[in-house]
Amino acid sequence: MCSLETLPQRVNLAEALIEELIRSFPEELQKVTRQVHLNLMGRPEPADPEDALDTDLLGLFEGEVLADQGESPHPFPPQITLFLDNLLDAANGCPEKFQKEIKITYLHELGHFLGWDEEDLERRQLD
């Protein structure tokens, strides 16, 4: 078991878990998923202090959804950001729960990229 004491340790664990998860997808979904850049951070840090970014946020999807790709003259590349310190807090410091939170949150944000709304995510137990 990897230690979770430092952010770099949490990043290494998250990268490995997400790569393993992606490799478990069907080949076509793997190709689609690899279009989405992954950011791993400790906690949300709004670029603008006036930004109302939720400090308890676990994950965030930004960019064009899959169905809209190629339609915007100035597309914002799709990306998923996971906030590992918040995920660890949500898991109450438990390594097993932390790993589960990483996977669920990643899949939740990936669902947004695939065009799923909150009801779709809830039906898939990714809420």
Image (cartoon, rainbow, N blue to C red):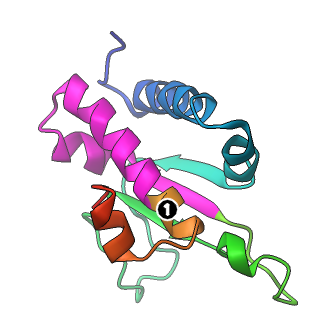
Quick one: label 1, few (<14), some, or many (20+) residues within 10 Å?
A: some
Q: Does 89 appear in magenta?
A: yes
Q: Residue furthest left?
A: 92
Provide the major secondary structure of the magenta segment.
helix
Residue 27's x, y, as percent? 72, 37
When the figure is inspected, residue 1 is found, relative to residue 69, above or below; the finding is above
Residue that numbered label 1 is attached to? 111
Task: Let me know if residue 57 appears in the view.
Answer: no
Question: Residue 78: where, in percent of width, then height?
Answer: 67, 66
In the displayed structure, 14 sits above or below 87; it is: above
Residue 91 in percent (x, y) is at: 17, 39
Residue lying at 39% horizontally and 63% vertically, measured from the top left: 44
Let me know if residue 50 appears in the view: yes
Residue type of the residue flagged with mark 1: Gly
Q: Residue at x 76, y 45 (%)?
A: 31
Work out which quarter of the rendered image holds the N terminus and state it: top left
Q: Is residue 99 left or right of residue 27?
A: left
Answer with the quarter of the image where residue 73 lies.
bottom right
In which quarter of the view is residue 60 placed?
Answer: bottom left
Pick the residue in front: 53 or 20.
20
Indicate the secondary structure of the residue bearing disc 1: helix
Q: Nearer the viewer, residue 67 or 6?
A: 67
Q: Residue at x 59, y 36 (%)?
A: 25
As drawn, 12 above or below 3: below
Which residues, given as a range, are shown in magenta?
79-108
Question: In the image, is residue 3 part of the stretch drawn in magenta?
Answer: no
Query: In this rendering, is residue 16 above or below 45?
Result: above
- Where does the image place residue 98, in percent across and percent down from the top left? 26, 34
Which residue lies at the image location 42% right of the left edge and 77% below the top edge? 117
Residue nearest the observer in this picture, 80 or 104: 104
On the rendered image, what quadrant is the C terminus found in?
bottom left
